[in-house]
Structures are given as structure tokens and as C-alpha cells.
């Protein structure tokens, strides 16, 4: 009885199939039973497969190692790093990069790892009158991991801390390149695509990475892991087609990753109000409501339209509900920034206009597209993207009409858009490209993707076959031509890149450069020798980051832009370059308990290339000292620019500030505690 009851349960889904499909399946089963069992594959076939995989893996690992060694050699030639003193080495870390490395140093000085973490999460020795959670605000997990590895591996007896730190970052860049290699290899089926990916990545490294200019940047730690994630997902989609359970697993992985990030980022509310979380929840809910109906019928098409509408509506609804119950500030700042950037709103706010003037937040320049074109990357990327996009759209329309995706896509089918990993990468690259067209800084996320996708395309016989099927090529056998082009085109590209760009790469390694900044070295030396240990320095946020790293002295501001209080501090301290009175500047500085003020000649006498983007211009707009648009009131300032006037040493400036040090670039003033007014 139990066997009879279990039978219908197992066969429940099969009852909905028509009879002719059942007969067809039974015929297939009989053919399989009658077919002779194939003998063991010949040894040379197994050896060929093993050799292909071995050579590909060797090429991938070698490419990553060679790139890491290239970065190390280039860094040494650029800065003469091994021939410099510790202070000169640390000055090469500029702005926010200096802050990240300074906390790595603090962790190494801590008596224990636990104590070091506590001091970073309750830090009151960096910014005056403020306790910050440095791990949360600056995402210092890389520095925590690097410090514990440095001490746990006994590297403190072998290598200096700075070499260990930059060595880890360069090693991660090698992993980054290897992951891109593997992704392109998985998609195309040939490691030749991986080699071409690496070649394009290195040749266009001005637009693929900022590792040469700023080693500790967060993206240099994060992007290698992102590339590994993309490679793993590509392999997963390639080997597992769109069954219900396997797509469901991807959703679970994304939700788990978001939850883990939420915890590690000290319950960051921005992740809870992320549109991605709402979209995944909507997709999972819609999947649960899907009904098994006969494909191709009017009801099936209607259900798909309802399902699509449900996902879109539910995503928006869930996101709105989350924003109602979860307090968040990050998205508000982003929305204001985008409104001003796209001309939907105007503002005189100094911080907002200063951010809009940053090169990384501008739209990409023409030079960017010209460089990608000169290396032949952009033309091939556009060709590959167009073919893949059209093929994917054809697949989507066929699915809407009730046709299911093929379980195995053959070369002669000429339907590259049937492959799940291709659909994923087409959507991904379009989204990343759209963001990169708005904000240039995001090109470092998109351009490596361009290298990988273009290399895959030109090395993929399926892509060429898809094109030939559309063209209805008959003069030459399309499969043969596709196989020939998938080998010939990347080979020709590789030789042309080698001939044109390899000599340039070698000349860069042979060319001796030198990072020469004696004025900053002299300033840091003076601070360490002359300033009291309890002194607090005020100046531009970028310079304050260097002071924190090189001297350890407390500062009034930092080059961080995710904290409202620090943003307000930065704007107030920048008033030293505005047309404000000595008394106003004195009140601002003493409110932050500053003891010394540093005026930078480069900012005071700045000659900006972009109109209206100099610091002093932005301050004049914010303070109403210049007309921004018609109808604005011009507030005339009876005071000269503070950074100019304070250098002249006349009253009332000498009453508040006493110059104690200066060189060609910096003027240091002691802020008087007792004010003596002179006539």
C-alpha cells in the first residue's frame, strides 16, 4: 500500500506532460539502454585535457605573479623606496591613504591585538574633541588583517612593516589579474582569452587601477575579492543551468553576503535599505508563487507578465518600507549630490561643490575613450557587447513566447545568448558601464570588466558563429571560419599590442623617477622636534592625514566624507583661505582646541584648471562674496583673503597668530592663547 501511495506523488509533475512527450522520453531511454557502453577514453584524450588545464592554470598564476612583480619593480623605480628614510617613505602616502596606513602602524605598536582593536573602535587620539570608531568609518579590516599576519607569521624579524603592507596589496593585485584571466577562460573555453585580458588590463592600467598612485585605497583591497566572486559565479552558472533550486542558491548566497556585511560593518543601515536586498526578496517571493502551466499558451504569457510586474512592484514597495523603518543618512547625501550633478538643483554649499569638482566624480573625459580605442580595446568590446546583447534579447523574447532554454548549446546553433553566464555578464557590464559614464572614478570597476569581456568575445567561436548565423554566411563553412577567427583575431591583436606597447612597459621600468618633496619632509621634521606632544594642528584635511601618519600628533580634521561632523569641520577649517576676519578664523580654530595653524601656499595661490573649482572660489561662493547666478546678493567683504593677510604680520593678525616656521610651501602659525592688541 505504501508503494502504491508513493507512486502518484513522485509522478505528479509528469502527469501534466502530453502523451507524445512521454513516448518520446521512453524511446530515448530504450535507445540509451540499447546503446553500447563506450570504452574508456583513450589516454591521449585525457592527456590532452589535462595538458590544456595545466597550461591554462600555469599561465593564469604566472600572469598574476608577473603583474605583482611588475608593480613592485615600478614602485621601486618611481619612489626609490629602498633608498629612502622611513619619513620619506611615509610621505608617499597622501591624503586618505596616509590615514589607512597610520592605523596599520598603530596596530603594530599596540601591546596586543585586542587592545589595538579597542583603541581603534574608541579612538580619541586622532581628531580633537571627537571619539570615532575608526574601523567602522574607514573600513579598516584590511589593516587589522595585515597587522595580525605581520606578527603571527614572524615577519617582523624579516621584513619592515611598510614592505609587508605594500607586498600584500601588490599580491592582491596579482590575484585580481588571475581572477580576470580565469573568468575570460571559463567563458571562452581557451586560456588565450585570459592572456589577452591580462595584456589589455596592463596596457590600460591608467584606467583599470589606481594602485600606482595610492596603494592603501579601499578599492585595491576590495576589487580582487570582487573579481574572484565574479569568476566563481561565472563557473557556477556555466556548469549549472537555470533549474529552480540552483538559481535559488544564488539568491541565498547574496542574502547571506549582505547580512554578513551588515554585521561586519557595525550594523550598517545602508545595506538594509539597499535596492539589491529588496530585489532578491521580491524574486524569491515571486518564485514561490509561480504556477506550473503549459508553456506557450496565452495563460503562460499572461502569468510571466504578472510575475514581472509583481517583482518590480514588490521591490519598490519593500525598499520604501525598509527606508521608513530603518534610519539612514548615506542615501540622502547621495541623492542631493546626484540632483546637483545632473542640474536638477543648485547649491552654494562648499562641501557639495567641492566634491563635484573632484576629478574622480566628473564624467569621463574624451582622453579616456581615446586611450581605450588606441589599444583596440573599446572597438572590440563594443562589437562583442552588441552581438551578446542582441542574442540575449532574442533569448528573452523566445522565453516570453514560451520556448524554454536549451540544456546544451552547441556551436552550430549560433546562440551565445542562451548561456546563463553570458546573460549575467551582459547585464553586469551594462550596469557598470552606465555608472562609469556618470562618475569617472567608477571606471576602475568597469574597465577591467571591459578587458575581460572583449577578450572572451574575440576568442569565442560561439560569438563568431552567432554573427555568421545572422549574416547567413554560405560561401565558407561558418563553423570552420568561426574556429579560425577565434584563434587568428586574438593572435593578431596580441602581436600588435606586443609590438606597440611592450617597449613602453620596459622603458617605464628602466626610467628612473624620483618623488621629491623636501618641504613636506622639513615640515614633518620640525613638528616632531619642536611641537609639544599635546599640540593640535589645523589645516587642509589632506595635509592633516600626512601629519597623523608621520608624526602621530592630533589634528582637527581628516580627509573623510562619510561623517557629517568631519565634513563641517573641513569646511570650517578651509575658511583660512576665505575673505574672513582674523577674529572669525581665531574663533573657529579655538573652538576645535587647535594650537597650530598650517597655511599651504599651493592652496592660497592656487591656479585651477577648472573654472570655479579652486578652494578659495568655492569659499567665496559659499560665503556670498561672489555672484553665483542672477538674483543673488553680493555680500562685499571688507577683509582681504586671510591666507594672504596673515603673512604680512600686521595688526590685528599678529595679535591672534604668531609665525613660528615657514618654508617655500608651508607657513606654520602658533595660535595665541593670550591676545595682546597692538596699534
Image (cartoon, rainbow, N blue to C red):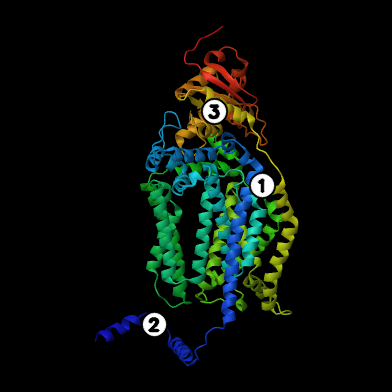
Q: Which residue is mark 2?
A: 14
Which of the 4 image quarters holds residue 426? bottom right
Taking the view exactly as shown, the residue that stands out farthest to the bottom is: 34
**x then y, percent, for residue 598:** 56, 25
Q: Is residue 385 shown above or below 39? A: above
**CB contact under 8 Å: marks 3 and 1:** no
Q: Nearer the viewer, mark 3 or mark 1?
A: 3
**x then y, percent, for residue 342:** 58, 44
Q: Is residue 408 shown above or below 672? A: below
Closer to the camera in the image, 81 or 386: 81
* Local secondary structure at mark 3: loop
**x then y, percent, for residue 552:** 49, 31
**CB contact under 8 Å: marks 1 and 2:** no
Marks 3 and 1, how far apart in space?
A: 31 Å
Q: Nearer the viewer, mark 3 or mark 2?
A: 3
Tell me what residue is drawn at x 28 percent, y 85 percent.
Answer: 3
Residue 235 visible somewhere in the drawing: yes
Q: Which residue is mark 3?
A: 539
Which of the 4 image quarters holds residue 540? top right
* Local secondary structure at mark 1: loop
Marks 3 and 2, how far apart in space?
A: 75 Å
Of the image marks 3 and 1, the number of the one nearer the N terminus: 1
Of the image marks 3 and 2, the number of the one nearer the N terminus: 2
* Local secondary structure at mark 2: helix
Of the image marks 1 and 2, the number of the one nearer the N terminus: 2
Q: Which residue is mark 1?
A: 365
Q: Locate the N terminus by quadrant.
A: bottom left
**x then y, percent, for residue 560:** 50, 38
Marks 1 and 2, how far apart in space?
A: 58 Å
Q: Nearer the viewer, mark 1 or mark 2?
A: 1
Tell me what residue is drawn at x 56 percent, y 15 percent.
Answer: 653
Please give left or right for residue 576 compared with residue 378 in the image: left
Amino acid at each position: 500500500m505504501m508503494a502504491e501511495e508513493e507512486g502518484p506523488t513522485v509522478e505528479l509533475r509528469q502527469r501534466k506532460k502530453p502523451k507524445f512527450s512521454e513516448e518520446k522520453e521512453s524511446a530515448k531511454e530504450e535507445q540509451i539502454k540499447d546503446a553500447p557502453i563506450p570504452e574508456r577514453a583513450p589516454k591521449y584524450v585525457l592527456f590532452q585535457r589535462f595538458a590544456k588545464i595545466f597550461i591554462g592554470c600555469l599561465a593564469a598564476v604566472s600572469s598574476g605573479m608577473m603583474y605583482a612583480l611588475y608593480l613592485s619593480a615600478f614602485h621601486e623605480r618611481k619612489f626609490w623606496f629602498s633608498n629612502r628614510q622611513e619619513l620619506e617613505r611615509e610621505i608617499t602616502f597622501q591624503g586618505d591613504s596616509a590615514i589607512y596606513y597610520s592605523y596599520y602602524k598603530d596596530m603594530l605598536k599596540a601591546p596586543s591585538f585586542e587592545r589595538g582593536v579597542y583603541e581603534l573602535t574608541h579612538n580619541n587620539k586622532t581628531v580633537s574633541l571627537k571619539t570615532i570608531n575608526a574601523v567602522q568609518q574607514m573600513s579598516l579590516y584590511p589593516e587589522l588583517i595585515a597587522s595580525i599576519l605581520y606578527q603571527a607569521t614572524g615577519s617582523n624579524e624579516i621584513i619592515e612593516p611598510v614592505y609587508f603592507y605594500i607586498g600584500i596589496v601588490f599580491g592582491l593585485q596579482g590575484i585580481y589579474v588571475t581572477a580576470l584571466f580565469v573568468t575570460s577562460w571559463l567563458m571562452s573555453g581557451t586560456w588565450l582569452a585570459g592572456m589577452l585580458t591580462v595584456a589589455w588590463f596592463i596596457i590600460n592600467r591608467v584606467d583599470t587601477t589606481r594602485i600606482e598612485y595610492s596603494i592603501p585605497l579601499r578599492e585595491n583591497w576590495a576589487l580582487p575579492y570582487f573579481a574572484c566572486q565574479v569568476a566563481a559565479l561565472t563557473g557556477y552558472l556555466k556548469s549549472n543551468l537555470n533549474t529552480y533550486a540552483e538559481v535559488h542558491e544564488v539568491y541565498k548566497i547574496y542574502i547571506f553576503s549582505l547580512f554578513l556585511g551588515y554585521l561586519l560593518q557595525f550594523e550598517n543601515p545602508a545595506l538594509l535599505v539597499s535596492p539589491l536586498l529588496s530585489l532578491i526578496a521580491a524574486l524569491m517571493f515571486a518564485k514561490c508563487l509561480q504556477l506550473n502551466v503549459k508553456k506557450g499558451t496565452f495563460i503562460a504569457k499572461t502569468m510571466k507578465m504578472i510575475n514581472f510586474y509583481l517583482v518590480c512592484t514588490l521591490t519598490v514597495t519593500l525598499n520604501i518600507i525598509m527606508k521608513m523603518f530603518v534610519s539612514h543618512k548615506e542615501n540622502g547625501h547621495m541623492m542631493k549630490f546626484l540632483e546637483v550633478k545632473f542640474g536638477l538643483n543648485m547649491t552654494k554649499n562648499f562641501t557639495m561643490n567641492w566634491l563635484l569638482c573632484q576629478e574622480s566624480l566628473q564624467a569621463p573625459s574624451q582622453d579616456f575613450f581615446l586611450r581605450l580605442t588606441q589599444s583596440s580595446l573599446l572597438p572590440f568590446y563594443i562589437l562583442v557587447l552588441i552581438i551578446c546583447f542582441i542574442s540575449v534579447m532574442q533569448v528573452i523574447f523566445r522565453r516570453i513566447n514560451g520556448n524554454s532554454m536549451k540544456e546544451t548549446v552547441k556551436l552550430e546553433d549560433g546562440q551565445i545568448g542562451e548561456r546563463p553566464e553570458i546573460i549575467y555578464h551582459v547585464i553586469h557590464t551594462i550596469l557598470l558601464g552606465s555608472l562609469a559614464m556618470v562618475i569617472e572614478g567608477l571606471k576602475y570597476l568597469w574597465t577591467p570588466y571591459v578587458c575581460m569581456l572583449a577578450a572572451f568575445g574575440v576568442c569565442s567561436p560561439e560569438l563568431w558563429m552567432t554573427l555568421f548565423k545572422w549574416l547567413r554566411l554560405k560561401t565558407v563553412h561558418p563553423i570552420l571560419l568561426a574556429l579560425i577567427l577565434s584563434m587568428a583575431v586574438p593572435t593578431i591583436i596580441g602581436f600588435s599590442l606586443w609590438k606597440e606597447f611592450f617597449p613602453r612597459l620596459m622603458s617605464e621600468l628602466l626610467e628612473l623617477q624620483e618623488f621629491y618633496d623636501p618641504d613636506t619632509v622639513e615640515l614633518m621634521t620640525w613638528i616632531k622636534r619642536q611641537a609639544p606632544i599635546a599640540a593640535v594642528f589645523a589645516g587642509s584635511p589632506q595635509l592633516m592625514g600626512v601629519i597623523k601618519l608621520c608624526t602621530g600628533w592630533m589634528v582637527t580634521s581628516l580627509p573623510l566624507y562619510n561623517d557629517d561632523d568631519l565634513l563641517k569641520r573641513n569646511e570650517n577649517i578651509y575658511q583660512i583661505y576665505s575673505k574672513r576676519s582674523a577674529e572669525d578664523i581665531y574663533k573657529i580654530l579655538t573652538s576645535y582646541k587647535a594650537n597650530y595653524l598650517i597655511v599651504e601656499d599651493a592652496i592660497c595661490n592656487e591656479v585651477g584648471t577648472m573654472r570655479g573649482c579652486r578652494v578659495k572660489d568655492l569659499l567665496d561662493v559659499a560665503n556670498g562674496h561672489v555672484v553665483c547666478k542672477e538674483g543673488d546678493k553680493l555680500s562685499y567683504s571688507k577683509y582681504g583673503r586671510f591666507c594672504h593677510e596673515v603673512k604680512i604680520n600686521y595688526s590685528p593678525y599678529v595679535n591672534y597668530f604668531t609665525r613660528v616656521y615657514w618654508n617655500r610651501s608651508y607657513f606654520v602659525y602658533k595660535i595665541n592663547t593670550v591676545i595682546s592688541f597692538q596699534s
